[in-house]
Image (spheres, rainbow, N blue to C red):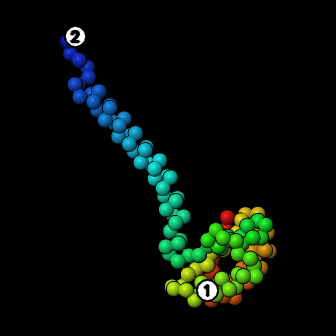
Amino acid sequence: MNADADPTPPWGPSLDVLALGTMATGLALLSLALILVPQRLAQRPASQGIVSLRLAADGQLRLWNQPVPRGQLIPVLQRLEAGPGSPTLRLVPDRDVPWGVVQGLMGQLGRSDLPLELQLP
C-alpha cells in the first residue's frame, strides 16, 4: 500500500460543505413554509366570499373584528345579502361557548337567505 496516497479524493471536503449548505437551505425553506402557509390559509376565506362571524365565550359577536350587538345582527345580515356576490356566513364559536347558545344563534342565523357554515374549534 502506498503511504503517500490520500484516502479522500480532492473534492471530498467540498462535497460535505455542499451537502450541509443544501440541508441548511432546505430547513430554512421548510421553516418559512411552516410560517407562511397557515397565514395564507387564514386569508383565503375572505377572497372566497366567506364572512366569519365569531362568537366569544361571553356571548359577544364580532364581525370583521368589530362587535355586533345581537339586536343589530339581522340588519347586518340583510346588508350582506343585498351586497355584491353571494357570501357564505361562517359561524366560529369559541371553545368555551355552550352548545345550546351555538344552536340558538344558528337558528337565528338560519332565518336569513345566506348560506351558513359552522366551524368547530
Instruction: Give the amino acid at mark 2.
Output: Ala
Quarter that holds the C terminus = bottom right
Question: Can you say whether 52 is above or below 95 in the image?
Answer: below
Q: Which mark lies nearer to you, 1 or 2?
A: 1
Q: Give the residue type at disc 1.
A: Arg
Q: How busy is the neighbourhood of tag 1: few (under 14 within 10 Å), some, or many (20 plus)? A: few
Callout 1: helix, strand or loop? helix
Left or right for 49, reference 68: left
The residue that appears at 77% across and 70% down in the rendered structure is 59
Left/right placement of residue 73 relative to residue 42 reads right
Which residue is labeled 1 in the image?
79
Pointers 1 and 2 in contact (C-beta within 8 Å): no
Residue that carries the numbered disc 2 in the rendered image: 3
Give the camera-side residue of 108 and 120.
108
Q: Position of residue 114 (x, y in %)?
A: 61, 85
Q: Tell me: 88 left or right of 4.
A: right
* Quarter of the image where the N terminus is located: top left
Q: Quadrant of residue 97?
A: bottom right
Residue 115: in sight, yes or no?
yes
Residue located 46% across and 53% down the image: 33
Q: Is residue 121 above or below residue 73?
A: above
Residue 64: give its label.
Answer: none
Task: Please state if 42 lies on the left or on the right of 32 as rendered.
Answer: right
In the rendered structure, which disc, 1 or 2, sits on the residue that comes first in sequence? 2
User: Who's the residue at 22% across and 10% down the image?
Assistant: 3
Task: From this view, report whether residue 75 is shown above or below residue 58.
Answer: below
User: Which percent across, then down, holds residue 34?
Assistant: 49, 52
Measured as percent of width and height from the top left, residue 85 is found at 51, 85
